Image (tube, grey):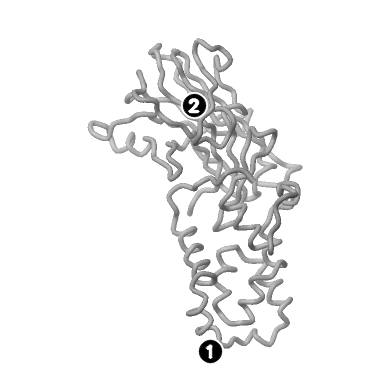
Amino acid sequence: MSEKSVREVESPFSLSLEEATRMSENHGKRRREIVSDSSSPFDSFPEDCISKIVSFTRPRDACVVASVSKAFESAAKSDVVWDKFLPPEYESLVPSSRHFSSKKELYFTFCEESVLIDDGTKSFWLDKASGKKCIMLSAMNISIMWGDTPQYWEWVTFPEARFKRVAKLLDLCWFEIRGRTNTGVLSPRTRYSAYIVFKKVNHCNSLEDVSIEAGVGVVGNEASTRFIYFDARVDGLSLRRRRRRPHERRDGWMEIELGEFFSGGHIMNSDEIEMSAFETKLGHWKSGLIIQGIEIRPVRT
């Protein structure tokens, strides 16, 4: 596993999951008292039967039902349950040096720690509430116009980054970044959002209140577009623009949503998704950004 990657501001879904987890693990004494005095018509069911039923729910639900009764508590901890929440390829993602006492422990490790894949050019983790797959494409894994020209971009190491190198914008007019992923590597039947993850270096020259066109869509089809702002001021901007300004993440980086897409089907019926951000019309020289990559995670509902 790589270093811990701190997630963004939690939604009600993930907050509920944390509350349920604390209730089932950290507040054990109080919960055991409740459970010991509780019974359920399902308590007479075999534990493996209850586990099988719970495995068809979501991780958040499994944490909640553990408080119903002792029978549910034991069944909800079962590897039968948490194995269903892990991705099919999870064994290949776990270093041989790591050992876990249960599939539940392994699941929460995947939620809290990102795993570097594809020769360290992508990171992978699970959404805690839903178990859906999340990935980040590093700057090394996306197409950056003039990215191999030292006059315009510099590839540097950054202590706070997940990846070995990030891209630092030095000075250029033609700003264009494009990343691609196949929906086959994501969770099916899931709506995803794509975010560009970056930092500002001192002053972002010519990026203040400059609209950058962003797009997300299936390759070969017309993309859904919007305008984003790397360094938008709150005062003087319309409400529509304020919605697309950057937000600070818990890990200290900034992010802006590029757009959404739907991961519809099986790997044999997958789509290639392209995500882009560019400004090539104004001719202004731009500088002062550090691009870590493009993050793809499920839309919070």
Residues at marks 2 and 1 touching, judged by CB atoms closer than 8 Å: no
Residue 49's x, y, as percent?
72, 77
The residue closer to the viewer here, 298 or 151, is 151
Q: Residue 282 falls in which quadrant of the image?
A: top left
Residue 216's x, y, as percent?
54, 33
User: Residues under labels 2 and 1: Cα distance?
Assistant: 57 Å
In this view, 35 is above or below 102 = below
Amino acid, disc 1: Asp
Amino acid, disc 2: Ala
In this view, 150 is above or below 197 = above
Marks 2, 1: nearer the viewer: 1
Residue drawn at point x = 73 percent, y = 82 percent: 46
In this view, 243 is above or below 129 = above
Residue 88's x, y, as percent?
74, 52
User: Which residue is the site of mark 1?
Assistant: 37
Mark 2 nearby-residue class (10 Å; few <14, some 14–19, many ≥20): many
Task: Single out the residue that lies furthest toward the left.
Answer: 236
